[in-house]
Structure formats: structure tokens, C-alpha cells
Image (cartoon, grey):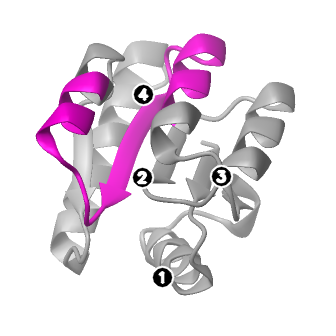
Amino acid sequence: MKILIVDDSAFARELIRNELLGLGFGEKEITIADSGASAIRKISIEAYDLFLVDLVMPGIDGVRVAREIRQGQPNARVVICSGKLNPETHQVLNLMGVHDFLEKPFTQEQFRQAIVQNIASVYASSGRG
């Protein structure tokens, strides 16, 4: 399982990383991108199973990152993590095939539920389960 965390907030990245470690994922399974541009560079050279993407970032935002993911890795699962998700953006993401959202601030239980659900989908679609 390969996971990419995309968030411009060091605090948010560390929080998400620690939650993933608490769920049993290893350090080698988790990659960090501190910006949309960094994420796009990483996904152009490596495949990931799950993306946790902040929506609002300076420069390249989460919508553009999600679009790049869908074009290059259409079977990957994408979870948008944001406190600012308006209906128009929600619709655009849905049309791209992104249907998983975590509203910041989210609880530990909401996070765990989203991760478990998406991991199950990764395994089901890949035949690894």
C-alpha cells in the first residue's frame, strides 16, 4: 500500500501521518508532499494507492492535484481533506470521480473510517484482498 499525503500545513501532514502510523501503516508506505506542485512531481514518477489531498493550497490547489491523479492514476483512491468545500467544487470533484471527503477539523474516528473504507476499496479493485 502506497499513500501520498498532500497538504501545505506541516501540522496537518504530521497529524495525518501519525494517524496512518497508528492504523498500522509503515513509514515506507507513507510519502509526503508539501504542495500541489510537489505532489504532481511525485505522481508523475510513482504510483500510489491512496491520496489524502488538502483542497486549499497556494499555487496548485487540490482540485488540480485530483485532476492530475485521475489522469495518471485513475484507479487510485482520493480523499479530499478540507474545511472549505463549496458546492461547486464538490460537484467538479464528483465529476472527476472523487467522492470521498473529510471536513476539517475531522475526528480520529471519521479519519479512521475514511481510511478503512478506502483501503478496502483499493484491495477489492486490485484483487489483493
Report which residue position mark 2 lands on. 55
Q: Nearer the viewer, residue 56 or 7?
A: 56
Q: Earlier in the sequence, mark 3 or mark 1?
A: 1
| Number of the label disc, if any, that sits on residue 123 | 4
| Number of the label disc, if any, that sits on residue 15 | 1
Q: Position of residue 41 (x, y in %)?
A: 83, 39
Range shown magenta = 66-92
Q: CA distance from mark 3 to mark 2?
A: 11 Å
Q: Nearer the viewer, mark 1 or mark 4?
A: 1
Q: Nearer the viewer, mark 3 or mark 2?
A: 3
Q: CA distance from mark 1 to mark 4?
A: 25 Å
Q: Position of residue 39 (x, y in %)?
A: 71, 46
* Left or right position of 120 against 41: left
Q: CA distance from mark 4 to mark 2?
A: 26 Å
Q: Position of residue 8 (x, y in %)?
A: 60, 69
Q: Earlier in the sequence, mark 4 or mark 3?
A: 3
- The residue under label 4 is which amino acid type? Tyr
Q: Earlier in the sequence, mark 4 or mark 2?
A: 2
Q: Is residue 85 above or below residue 13?
A: above
Q: Nearer the viewer, mark 4 or mark 2?
A: 2
